[in-house]
């Protein structure tokens, strides 16, 4: 057992593990269990764990000494996972795995979240507040403030996705903050963009995920809700914005907006279009296609930030199959190539970890 080793994060184990085993402990919360069968008919379990930095799937084979304990592990249990960790193109492998529950003090530290992730999300939320305050249309400004006031706590513990990108508690804050910073930088370059509308659309485009990808007040296991499963985040987002907009028009402040142009209904319709079209294509879940400059900009900002997050994660766990070439990591479409460093800087992919994974695993 690794009793003298402080637990590291899931993100850290993905970055550090390669072909050469590393002994480490991870504090993580058990999320779910699925029973699978190999092509040869051998049963095994897939256990999903999570912490503040991400998710981890572990395979437990039927002949493993931990199989029965894995089959009995209760959802939401917070444990210390100890193993010699390796990684190949199929994922993370724990050798000589053991686990035990955390004590009360260590559990409290775990639920407080990884300090680096927590600090980043606090800075991101501060940027969200600042950029939302910069919206000059009084109706859109008031709408954003109402959302952040009423839904801010839930927003701050929501993921941007269940997998693939920003799939962690608070990931939606990170995703929205980066998109807002990008949108604010883009608007001066393309003056035809309505900055107020675009920033509002960025803030609210995924607000339905507060039900689709939410987390409890304490813990890192995503909640499954009937609303999220049966409607999805786009219809839920449209419904939430309509509710907030109606409440806004019934507020005392609305009397001062009577003569504002464009009219409230036109403004609301354009905002709803951003939410409805932000996936960009019917096959990706958009009920309508982008039809305005802001809708096209929002779709591409959303896609860009998601893809770059996927790339960061892929480089952290990719298996190097030849010098500078990394095996494909789903859902990216092809093998990755080591990025070109900026002049005078070190390579952006950890060469020490990559060198451990230089040969394909058979």
Image: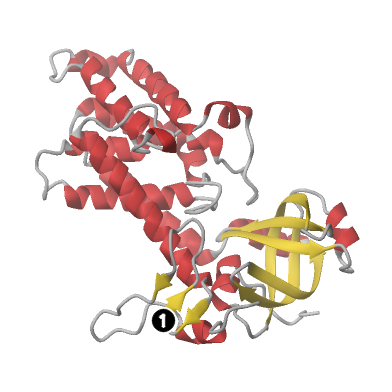
Give residue 182's position: percent from left, percent from top.
25, 52
The number of numbered discs placed on residues in the rendered structure image is: 1
Residue at image coords 80%, 67%: 99
| Residue 101 appears in the figure | no
User: 256 above or below 143?
Assistant: above
The quarter in which the C terminus is drawn is bottom right
Question: Which quadrant of the figure has residue 194?
Answer: top left
Residue assigned mark 1 = 324
Horizontal side, residue 62 vs residue 320: left or right = right
> As rendered, which of 117 and 33 lies closer to the eye?
33
User: 92 above or below 24?
Assistant: above
Give residue 136's position: percent from left, percent from top.
18, 34
Give residue 139's position: percent from left, percent from top.
24, 25
> As rendered, which of 237 and 322 lies closer to the eye?
322
Q: Residue furthest front?
A: 40
Residue at image coords 39%, 56%: 307
The quarter in which the N terminus is drawn is bottom right
Residue at image coords 18%, 36%: 293
> As rendered, which of 168 and 165 lies closer to the eye?
165
Give residue 228's position: percent from left, percent from top.
56, 31
| Residue 162 appears in the figure | yes
Horizontal side, residue 155 vs residue 201: left or right = right
Q: Secondary structure at mark 1?
A: loop
Tell me which colouring the rendered structure shows. secondary structure
Question: Which quadrant of the figure has residue 63?
Answer: bottom right
């Amino acid at each position: 057992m690794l009793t003298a080793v402080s637990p590291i994060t899931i993100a850290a184990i993905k970055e550090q593990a390669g072909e050469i085993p590393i002994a480490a402990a991870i504090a993580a919360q058990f999320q779910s269990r699925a029973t699978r069968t190999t092509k040869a008919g051998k049963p095994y379990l897939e256990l999903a764990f999570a912490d503040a930095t991400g998710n981890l799937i572990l395979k437990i084979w039927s002949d493993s000494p931990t199989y029965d304990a894995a089959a009995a592990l209760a959802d939401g249990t917070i444990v210390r996972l100890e193993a010699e960790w390796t990684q190949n193109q199929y994922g993370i492998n724990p050798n000589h795995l053991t686990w035990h529950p955390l004590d009360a003090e260590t559990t409290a530290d775990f639920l407080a979240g990884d300090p680096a992730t927590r600090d980043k999300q606090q800075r991101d939320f501060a940027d969200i507040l600042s950029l939302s305050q910069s919206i000059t249309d009084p109706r859109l400004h008031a709408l954003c403030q109402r959302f952040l006031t009423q839904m801010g706590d839930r927003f701050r513990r929501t993921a941007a996705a269940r997998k693939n990108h920003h799939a962690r508690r608070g990931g939606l804050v990170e995703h929205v903050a980066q998109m807002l910073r990008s949108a604010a930088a883009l608007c001066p370059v393309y003056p035809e963009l309505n900055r107020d509308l675009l920033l509002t659309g960025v803030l609210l485009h995924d607000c339905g995920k507060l039900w689709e990808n939410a987390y409890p007040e304490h813990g890192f296991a995503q909640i499954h809700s009937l609303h999220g499963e049966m409607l999805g985040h786009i219809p839920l987002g449209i419904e939430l914005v309509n509710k907030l907009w109606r409440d806004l028009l019934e507020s005392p402040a609305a009397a001062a907006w009577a003569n504002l142009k464009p009219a409230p209904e036109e403004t609301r319709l354009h905002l709803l279009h951003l939410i409805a079209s932000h996936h960009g294509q019917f096959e990706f879940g958009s009920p309508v296609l982008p039809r305005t400059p802001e809708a096209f900009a929002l779709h591409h900002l959303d896609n860009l930030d998601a893809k770059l997050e996927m790339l960061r994660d892929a480089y952290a766990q990719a298996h190097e199959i030849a010098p500078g070439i990394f095996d494909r990591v789903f859902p990216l479409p092809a093998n990755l190539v080591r990025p070109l460093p900026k002049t005078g800087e070190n390579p952006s992919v950890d060469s020490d970890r990559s060198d451990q994974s230089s040969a394909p695993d058979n």
